Image: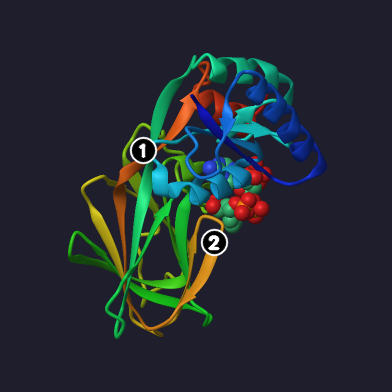
Amino acid sequence: MMKYAIQSRNDKLSNQLMDEAMDYLNGFGLVQDREEPDIVLSIGGDGTLLHAFHKYSYRLKETAFVGIHTGHLGFYADWKPSELEKLVISIARKEYDVIEYPLLDVTINYREKKESSLYLALNESSVKSPEVTLVMDVELNHNHFERFRGDGLVMSTPSGSTAYSKALGGAVVHPSLPSMQLTEMASINNRVFRTVGSPLILPAHHKCVLKPVKGPDFMVTIDHLQLLHKDVKSIEYKVSEERVRFARFRPFPFWRRVKDSFIDKNE
Ligand code: NAP
């Protein structure tokens, strides 16, 4: 028997749709299971799906996600509320494929504390300093690449390339490419200080390590979560071996979503 869970943005329309979806799904004999769902319906926006992803990140191999948008069209939330009935019928009949997108592994090591903090990001991780300027050495595959001075650095997944990374001039990367992208936030570039100045797209087997030059405390985001990490020795990024699974009920090509979201919705 198929088990489902619903994550709502918690506004009136999303909660109303959640009630409707539950009625339909229960009517088709599916069972609500908030601990071990086979499928998670996220109702709201891409931000709601980020919350759902982190809630169920402990069972990514078993759970597939699908997003309904109650606001504008999203990249993860690409179903319209009017399509709810159609979607529920497809779920009940298991008429869907599963597509997988790459994720980002984030490891934060500390100078004194032995245990590292491990995170998984669906969109990206950003690093900023509580002081005005972030100064970090950037290492690629154990080799020193540059000393970054500026507002911050962002490492994004391919599916996160349409979010924060894009606002920083990053490329839009197709989610079938297992990769991660490093973008700069306002780097200081003059005769003395120099960074590459372009976003870098790194393949799956590469590793990027940030090593503090100034100040041991950093604001690190993992998607919508932000934490101050103290006494940081290094921050490591690599493409994760884990992947997120999305239930795909009909073709909706990525470039079509990019066009509809950023250019126009007309032919
Ligand atoms: P938020 O500030 O409430 O929303 C940020 C916006 O990013 C929302 O419009 C959200 O879409 C959209 N978004 C999220 N994931 C996306 C994706 N993969 N592709 C395209 N758009 C996407 O924050 P939140 O809802 O908690 O989401 C956290 C995310 O905000 C972070 O992961 C980061 O990517 C993004 N962010 C963006 C900027 C920027 O663009 N300058 C700055 C900081 C953070 P919905 O409206 O559909 O939820």
Figure label count: 2
Work out whether residue 267 or residue 71 is closer to the camera in this orientation and state it. 71
How far from the left and from the top, in percent, is residue 50? 55, 47
Amino acid carrying label 2: it is Leu
Specify few, some or many for label 2: CA neighbours under 10 Å numbering under 14, 14-19, or 20 or more.
few
Residue 181 higher or lower than 78, as above or below? below
Compared across the picture, whether 257 is left or right of 20 comes to: left
Seen at 50% across and 63% down, the residue is 221
Residue 169 visible within the image:
no
Task: Say whether disc 1 or disc 2 marks the residue closer to the N-terminus.
Answer: 1
Specify few, some or many for label 1: CA neighbours under 10 Å numbering under 14, 14-19, or 20 or more.
few
Secondary structure under tag 2 reads strand
Residue 135 higher or lower than 12, as above or below? below
Q: Which residue of the protein is positioned furthest toward the left in this rendering?
A: 142
Residue 61: assigned label? 1
Labels 1, 2: front one: 1
How far from the left and from the top, in percent, is residue 130? 52, 80
How far from the left and from the top, in percent, is residue 238? 29, 54
Secondary structure under tag 1 reads loop
Compared across the picture, whether 33 is left or right of 104 comes to: right
Q: CA distance from mark 1 to mark 2?
A: 23 Å
Residue 85 sits in quarter? top right
- List the residue tagged with mark 2: 225
Work out whether residue 10 or residue 164 is closer to the camera in this orientation and state it. 10
Q: Is mark 2 within 8 Å of ligand 1?
A: no
Seen at 47% across and 31% down, the residue is 246
Amino acid carrying label 1: it is Lys
How far from the left and from the top, in percent, is residue 211? 30, 74
Seen at 48% across and 46% down, the residue is 56
Determine whether label 1 and label 2 are within 8 Å by CB. Answer: no
Residue 148 sits in quarter? bottom left
Residue 33 visible within the image:
yes
